[in-house]
Amino acid sequence: VREITVAIPGREHIYRVFVGAGLLAQAGTLLEVDRYSKVFVVTDEHMEKLALPKLQAALPEGHDYVAVPPGEAGKTIGTVERIWQAMRAAGCDRHSLVLILGGGVTGDMGAFAASTYMRGVAFAHLPTTLLAQVDSSIGGKTGVDFDGLKNLVGTFAQAVAVVSDTDLLATLPKRELRAGFGEMLKHGLISDADYFAQLTKKRPEDYTAAELELFIAKSVRIKAGVVEADETEGGRRKLMNFGHTVGHAIEALSWDTGHPLLHGEAVAIGLVVEADLSRRQGFITAADVACVQQAVELAGLPGAVPDLAMADIMTKMRGDKKDERGVIMFDLLAGIGRAVYGQVIDDAVVEEVLKRHMEAAGAR
Ligand SMILES: NC(=O)c1ccc[n+]([C@@H]2O[C@H](COP(=O)([O-])OP(=O)(O)OC[C@H]3O[C@@H](n4cnc5c(N)ncnc54)[C@H](O)[C@@H]3O)[C@@H](O)[C@H]2O)c1
Ligand SMILES: [Zn+2]
């Protein structure tokens, strides 16, 4: 078992992240569930079949659970209401512990429900996707999508602990495994060139379980380091947004196209476009951009912007919460392994770079 400690500054809040094989069966002990009045599990309908029985075997009698529909489409306040209702029906009080078993969607939503129920009850993440193990379970951002915008409504709330059982990845579909690499490549690009190089040696599905475990621990350390420096995104944490200004806009727009992108896929496209924006702003070379593009391709992730209206992409980016005073802010690369935040770029330049990366541009 690898154990990483995350310390949240000024909050006296420290939590442990456990990464390793077979940890689900030890969850009750690792999380000291006996200290709570009630254990309540939030999961999705896939994980209800694939992982919940194993977790339940490790929990005290008298626990309850709710299973929500899987997928981004259900990441809504309506689903949160169902979680609150189930918690209420189960008799959860302020001393209950909510265990969140699932990917980033369940994680963001379950943590939001827990952080608002009775003004907040303790929760722990038991992430089941690669993306959730490397990124979304760390750092305390919770939320739901609202009015066509990603994560518009949410809270900052830290888990009491995170238990990442790497055995769970065995059932993860290949497309989901690759999506996790979108965030992992981001971690390497913004802060660790060596890690980025390790991630670009093979296709995601060709790494061994042991190699993946090392990567997960590495990514957790990188994200934890950034969060420790800045919990609520005053500055440094924004580096985690690299690829996400463009990525979130494309992800949200893809919902209405009949070909919805996974979050990690949209992020991959964002990495390529925002790397090119970094070049256009004079931060990195064309060779660096090619390097990012090749990494995304090797990971089997999309690298081109789908055929969307330019005005819609610009509007979505402006509507995203990262805007300050109506200006679109970008968090860019200053090199492979280094990032800068809060960059303002002329709309005309952004459009020019986006256009260059449109799928249709290549087809023409
Ligand atoms: N809070 C944060 O800091 C943060 C960071 C990054 C991403 N996110 C959010 O995370 C979400 C994406 O998360 P995701 O990619 O994990 O998606 P997800 O939660 O939708 O999971 C993907 C799919 O895989 C299934 N699944 C999960 N684990 C499985 C397993 N072990 N075996 C088989 N199937 C499994 C799920 O049921 C689902 O159908 C987005 O909404 C994104 O905004 C949040
Ligand atoms: Zn992300």
Image (cartoon, helix red, strand yellow):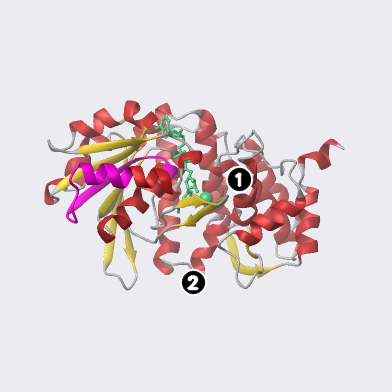
Residue farthest along the right direction in this orientation = 364
- Marking on residue 94: none
Kindly tell me whether residue 288 is visible in this rendering.
no
* Residue occupied by mark 2: 234
Q: CA distance from mark 1 to mark 2?
A: 25 Å
Instruction: Answer whether residue 84 is magenta in the image.
Output: yes
* Residue occupied by mark 1: 251
In this orientation, which residue lies closer to the viewer: 269 or 142?
142
In this rendering, the answer to whether 199 lies above or below 343 is: above
Give the residue type at disc 2.
Gly
**Percent of width and height locating residue 128:** 38, 37
In this rendering, the answer to whether 167 lies above or below 164 is: above
Q: Quadrant of residue 239?
A: bottom right
Left/right placement of residue 42 relative to residue 304 reads left
Residue extent of the magenta highlight: 83-105
Give the residue type at disc 1.
Glu
Camera-near label (1 vs 2) is 1
Q: Residues within 10 Å of mark 2 (few under 14, many from 20)?
A: few
Q: Is label 1's Cβ within 8 Å of ligand 1?
A: yes
Residue drawn at point x = 40 percent, y = 28 percent: 170
Kindly tell me whether residue 204 is visible in this rendering.
yes
